[in-house]
Image (tube, helix red, strand yellow):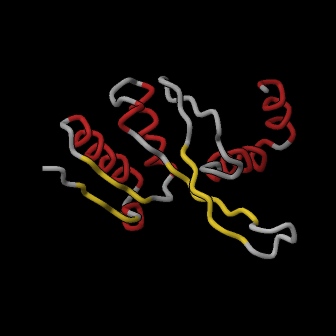
Amino acid sequence: MNEVIAVENPEVHLHPGLQLRFMEFFIENALIGKFSLVETHSDLMIRRVMRAITEEKLRQSWVNILFVDAEPVNEKGDIWTSKIERLKMDDRGVVSNWPDGFLDDDEKESKALMRALYGNRFTEEEADHE
């Protein structure tokens, strides 16, 4: 029997720690052959799945991470449509087509906080590591 559990935006009412535990539930379900569909905007939840792939707990072939973007339909750019694209990951979970603006708000906010706390000193150190 092929059953699928589908959940929409589970992160809405969950503390970040519970989001991670919730994803562990889905990872464990995958390990016993159950199918799940999770629609989320939580970078934390997606990163947890990516870590499971990197740690070889989940096989990459078991996971599809899709993102939706908008693209113009015509030359004038006054009509737009949605485009669904699959994240392309290698066996280690490294993404080759990471879209601009996808799951980067946490990183941007962390960098902004560090700049606010440490000013130019952080910006110079950050440049040294790039």
Residue lying furthest bottom: 78
Residue at 48% x, 46% y: name it. Answer: 65
Q: 23 or 125, which is in the foreground?
A: 23
- 29 vs 54, left or right, is left
- Count of residue discs: 0
Residue at 22% x, 43% y: name it. Answer: 29
User: In this rendering, is residue 115 above or below 83?
Assistant: above
Q: Quadrant of residue 83?
A: bottom right
Question: Could you tell me residue 71's position as x and y percent?
Answer: 72, 62
Q: Quadrant of residue 24?
A: top left
Residue lying furthest left: 1
- 11 vs 3, left or right, is right
Q: 114 or 102, which is in the foreground?
A: 102
Residue at 45% x, 26% y: name it. Answer: 54
User: In this rendering, is residue 7 above or below 109?
Assistant: below
User: In this rendering, is residue 91 above or below 38?
Assistant: above
Quadrant of the image containing the C terminus: top right
Question: Could you tell me residue 115's position as x and y percent?
Answer: 78, 45
Residue at 44% x, 33% y: name it. Answer: 51
Q: Quadrant of residue 55?
A: top left
Question: Could you tell me residue 121's position as x and y percent?
Answer: 83, 35
Residue lying furthest front: 74
- 126 vs 65, left or right, is right
User: In this rendering, is residue 32 above or below 69?
Assistant: above
Q: 126 or 38, which is in the foreground?
A: 38
